[in-house]
Amino acid sequence: KSYGCAVETDSFSADTPAGRLPMKNILVKIPGAKPGIILVGTHYDTKRLPDFVGADDGGSSTAVMLEAARQLCKAPGKYAVWIAFFDAEEAVNKEWKDPDNRYGSRQMAAQLAASDDLPKVKAFLLVDLVGGKNIIFARNAESTKWLVDLVWKTAGNLGYGSIFVKEQLGASDDHLSFTARNVPSVDIIDLNHTAVYWHTPQDTIDKISPKSLAIVGHVVLESVKQLQQK
């Protein structure tokens, strides 16, 4: 709100293996001149583990989205940009097993479908686990190919071709709540290279690289710019 953005919150509850739990999604809305929405987002919750901080998962991606909001709120474009902060991406149980995950993104996707806003979403850019040192992002096999191509080409043009690599890996994440509803989506995540501390008490602030956050933010903002021109 301090950046001049309109902010909406959706408080809801969901049935989990630990019972019915309260949750809250946050959605920032930056208006555009023409119909159409570019959605970017992250989960901001942390894993329900003893002594777990979650500096990378999902502190790093939340930080990137907060800075993206600071940049984008003051410069509306052709299309609206919505910035989503999802609650409860993490499974309540230790293991990721459907449907015990993605509570917040499933809730938001369903709400946008009910309000007829979902068809207006032209692309969804998700970031997760982006703060590690010496990050490497493989192309997510469960993302939309043309959107992966756009983001990875943008990264290459910015000089980050050694970070956004041609390797392809699968990763289940909040974008699946939107691909399931035919929204073109891409997941920028480094789960397989640097995050050896994933879901452990060692996921602390000393693991975070400001340079990594800057690179991801740069790629996200430039990709939004590219989408604004499409």
Image (tube, rainbow, N blue to C red):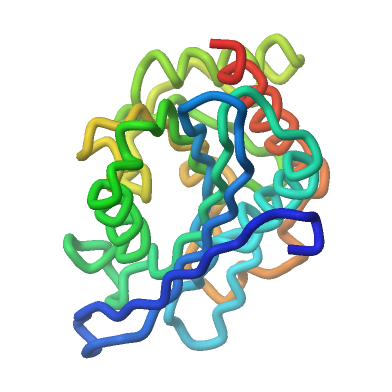
The x and y percentages for residue 219 are 68, 28
The x and y percentages for residue 68 are 71, 44
The x and y percentages for residue 45 are 50, 70
Q: Is residue 147 above or below residue 104?
A: above
Q: Is residue 115 above or below residue 152?
A: below
Residue at 55% in and 20% down: 151
In the shown orientation, is residue 5 left or right of residue 196?
A: right
Give the camera-side residue of 38 and 158.
38
Quadrant in the picture for residue 168:
top left
In the shown orientation, is residue 164 left or right of residue 112?
A: right
Residue at 47% in and 27% down: 35
Q: Is residue 82 above or below residue 21?
A: above
In the shown orientation, is residue 170 left or right of residue 205?
A: left
Residue at 38% in and 63% down: 89
Quadrant in the picture for residue 196:
bottom right
Q: Is residue 20 above or below residue 185?
A: below
The x and y percentages for residue 178 are 30, 41
Residue at 71% in and 20% down: 160
